[in-house]
Image: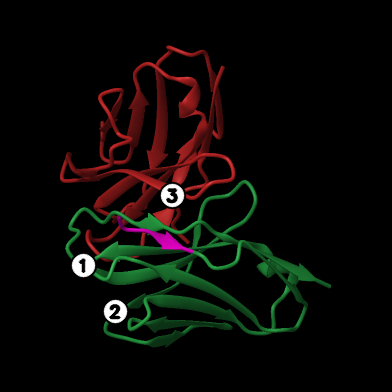
Chain colours: A red, B green
């Protein structure tokens, strides 16, 4: 069964450093998403992406964040200068269509900022 | 503001019993609802969805009920098994949303006793 994959599973970085989280969405999906989950809290939407541009972003997704689809299979989230409060699980998701549609999630990347 | 929340943070049931997990939403402009299961250290896993033009939908051992009058969503799990132990999230997408943003509730932890 096709699934969303994410690498790395765990990333440890120093405050102020740049990190890139990588995702490979399900191959025939066209819509891609990033969410984050701070430990013990609910999953929060960060950004949606379609046709090589951002469709929607939350207030969390400030200028320190960027997304890219560098090739036909990868979807990345970059945090330019990490802060302590960026420590969280980051989930990538993808769906066939936008709007109301089932989103399939990857296993997540645990980001720890020291 | 808009929010999706859960009535009970934890639920403990005996193996074989039925489980009911509840969710309240405050955004009446909602079109699509999904229940996700999240096991420890994993990403949200799709269980079942329902659109606002329906009030009930059944899957394998699971049923979702939607009451738009009181803005209430529930997930029923029949013959609960130890493998059902996880945190369950409801999520919704407003009808006006084209970016596909999912708004997640706080989560209910289901614990199944053998």
Is A3 situated left or right of A60 in this image? right
What residue did someone put label 3 on? A4
Q: Which mark is residue B52?
A: 2
Above or below — where is A26 with respect to A100?
Answer: above
Circle 2: is it few (<14), some (14-19), or many (20+) Cα within 10 Å? some
Quadrant of res B57: bottom left
What kind of element bears circle 1? loop
Q: Residue furthest right?
A: B114
Cα–Cα gap, marks 1 and 2: 9 Å
Mark 1 vs 2: CB contact within 8 A? yes
Residue positioned 34% across, 18% down in the render: A80
SS category of the residue bearing label 2: loop
Disc 1 chain ID? B
Of residue B25 and residue B47, the one placed in the foreground of this image is B25
Instruction: Please give left or right for residue A104 compared with residue A96 in the image.
Output: right
Residue B42: image tag: none
- Between the residue at mark 2 and the residue at mark 3, the CA separation in whole angstroms equals 27 Å
Segment tinted magenta in the rendering: B1-5
Q: Which residue is mark 1?
A: B95
């Amino acid at each position: 069964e096709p699934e969303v994959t994410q690498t790395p599973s765990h990333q440890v970085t120093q405050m102020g450093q740049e990190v890139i989280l990588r995702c490979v969405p399900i191959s025939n999906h066209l819509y891609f998403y990033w969410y984050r989950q701070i430990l013990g809290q609910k999953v929060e939407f960060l950004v949606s992406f379609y046709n090589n541009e951002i469709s929607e972003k939350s207030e969390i997704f400030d200028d320190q964040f960027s997304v890219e689809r560098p090739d036909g299979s990868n979807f990345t989230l970059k945090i330019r200068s990490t802060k302590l409060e960026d420590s969280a699980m980051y989930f990538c998701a993808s769906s066939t269509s936008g709007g109301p549609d089932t989103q399939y999630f990857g296993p997540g990347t645990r980001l720890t900022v020291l | 503001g808009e929010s999706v929340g859960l009535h009970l943070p934890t639920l403990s049931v005996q193996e074989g019993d039925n489980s009911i997990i509840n969710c309240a939403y405050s955004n009446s402009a909602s079109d699509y609802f999904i229940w996700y299961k999240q096991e420890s250290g994993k990403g949200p896993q799709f269980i079942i969805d329902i659109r606002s033009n329906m009030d009930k939908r059944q899957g394998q051992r699971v049923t979702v009920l939607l009451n738009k009058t009181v803005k209430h969503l529930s997930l029923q799990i029949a013959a609960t098994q130890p493998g059902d132990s996880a945190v369950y999230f409801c999520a919704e997408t407003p009808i006006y949303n084209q970016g596909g943003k999912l708004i997640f509730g706080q989560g209910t932890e289901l614990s199944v006793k053998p």
